Amino acid sequence: MKILKVCSLLVFLSGAFLLPACAQVLTAGQEPFTRADTLRGSLRPERTAYDVLYYHLNIRVEPETRHIEGYNDILFEATADFNRIQVDLFDNMNVDSILWNHKKLDWKREFNAVFIDFPEQVEKGANGTIRFYYSGSPIVAKRPPWDGGFVWTKSENGKPWIAVACQGTGASLWWPNKDHQTEEPDSMLISVAVPDGLMNISNGRSRGTKDLGNGYTRWDWFVGNPINNYDVSVNIADYAHFSEKYKGHTLNYYVLPENLEKAKKQFQEVPLMLACFEKHFGPYPFWEDGYKLIETPYLGMEHQSAVAYGNEYKMGYLGRDLSGTGVGLKWDFIIIHESAHEWFGNSITSADIADMWIHEGFTCYSESVYQECRWGYDEAMEYINGLKRNVMNDQPVIGPYGVNREGSGDMYYKAALMLNTIRHIIDDDEKWWDMLREYCEVFRHQIVTANDVTGFFCEASGRDLRPVFRQYLNHTELPELELVMEEGSFRYRWKAEAEGFNMPVDVFIGGKERRLHPTAKWQSESLPEGSEKDFHVAEKQFFVKVSKKEGA
C-alpha cells in the first residue's frame, strides 16, 4: 500500500518544519547508527521499487521444538524498473529457497535483509509473485510486548499456549516481508497449521480449517484490509470461544477455558468502548475483518482485528491506575487502550517508527475520551492530568528518521497531553470532536507523516498550530508561561524553543476566566484590585510550565 500524499497548500508550507529540526536534535548524544539500522529503517531503492499487493503466509508451528517452517507468497507491483529487491527476515531464520516463475532466484544476506536478484529486469507496472520458503526457531521474547519474539508457554490444562509480539523489533523476526511501516499489503491470507486439538486465531475472518492428515490442522484467516506487518499474529491454544452482537456485527472472544466465566463478565466493557469510540472517532475501521479479543500469555497488543488481551481480568493496568488518581481503575486498560489502536496505529499508520506518537499519543488520549464518555468531563481531566507524573521530558517525542528508531517514551503521555491542550486552544468541543472524526475519516487506512497530521489540524481548526506541535514534539522542555505580578497589573510572555510560539492560554482572575494571547514579547494587562491573590493558570486544560513571581 502506498503512502498517502496530502496536497494542500498548508501541508506543503509546513513540509520542512518537523524533519530537519528533529534530525538535528536527536542525533546528538545517541549511539551511532549502523548499516543494519539503515537497512532496517530506510526506504532504499531495493524497497521502493516494488509495492506489496498481497501476502499469503502459509506456515506450520511445532510447539515441542519451537520451530516454524513454510513460505510466504509475495504478490507485488513494480513501481520502478528493477533487477533486485529487498525482503526482510532475521538472520537466525533460514532462507530455504525463493522461487519466481517456478525457478530459484539468487539471493544474498546482509544482516536481516535478504537481497533477491532477478534473471532479467522487471519493468515498472508489472505484477508478479515470489514464493519465499523459510524455516527456523524465531527469537523468544524475554519481556513481551516490550521486546519482540515468540512466547511459548502452556495453559493450566498443560496444552501449548503460544503467541507472538513483534512491534518495534519487526515482523521479520518470524516471517519474510518488506518490514517497513510504509508497506501494508492490500489484503492477506494467513494459514497456520498447528497440532490437532489446538486452535490458531489470527487476524481477519475465518476461512475454515483443514485436517492435513499428519497430526496437524490448518487454520485459514483472510484479512481484507491493509494491515501493518507487525499486526500479523498467531494465537495458539485450546481456546474457548464465545460471541455477542453489537449493532448487527458479531464480536468474537477467545479465552482459556478456565477463564471463560471471568471473560464473559470482563468483556462486557467492549460494546461500551466501541460505542464511545465510534461516537468520537467514527465507525470501527475494520468491520469487514471483524473484531476479536484474544487472551494471550503477555499483557496485550493492538493486533488488527485480533486484539491481544493479557490484563488478567483486572481493572486498570494489571490492577494499577497509571494516572495515580484512582479513576483509571473503573475500566480495563488493555481493552480500551489496545482497541483504540484500531483507529490510531492500525487504520492511521505513521510512515516511520520515529513518528510513533501518531499511534501512541492519540491512543493514550483515547483513554481520557473513554473516561469522559462514561463518567464525564471532570473525571477525564482528572485522569489525563494524572498522567503528567509519567512525563520525562528527556528526549524529543519524534525520533530520528530512516533508522527504525523511536523517540522518547513521552510519545504516550506528553503527546496525549498536547492533544488535550489543543482541544482547549480550540475552545469549542463540538468543533474538536468533529475534527477528530474527520481526521479518522480522511486518513482511514492510510499511511501518514507528521506533516500530514499537523497540516490536517491546522487546516481543520483554522489556526496555525505548527509552533505548538513543534514545541511538544521536537523539543524536550514544556512551554513556560512567565508571569510577573505587579500592583494593579501583571506582565506575561512565553519562553519556548519553537520559533513563533504564540499559543493562547486561559487564566482565572478573581474567579473569572480570561484568555491570554502571549508571545515571546512581554505584554501587560490590568488586574482588578485584590485579584492578584486569586490568579491561576488553567493547567488542567493546558500542559505548560508556569513561572510566577512578584514584580519589583
Image (cartoon, rainbow, N blue to C red):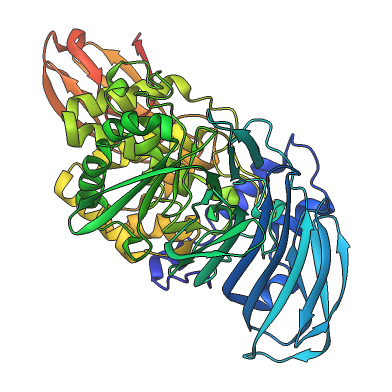
- Depth check: give the residue in front, 316 or 538: 316
Residue 66 on image: x %, y %: 73, 44
- Depth check: give the residue in front, 519 or 462: 462
Left-right relation of 227 to 316: right
Residue 395 on image: x %, y %: 60, 33
In this rendering, the answer to whether 547 lies above or below 356 is: above
The structure residue drawn at horizontal position 31% and vertical position 61%, both measured from the top left corner, is 287
User: In terms of image quadrants, where is residue 73?
Assistant: bottom right
- Depth check: give the residue in front, 405 or 527: 405
The structure residue drawn at horizontal position 79% and vertical position 37%, both measured from the top left corner, is 31
Residue 479 on image: x %, y %: 43, 31
User: In terms of image quadrants, where is residue 314?
Assistant: top left
Residue 432 on image: x %, y %: 22, 48
Quadrant holding the C terminus:
top left
In this rendering, the answer to whether 236 lies above or below 43 is: above
Q: Does the rendering let one see residue 468?
A: no
Q: Does the rendering let one see residue 9?
A: yes
Left-right relation of 463 to 58: left
Left-right relation of 425 to 205: left
In this rendering, the answer to whether 498 lies above or below 180 is: above
Left-right relation of 139 to 193: right
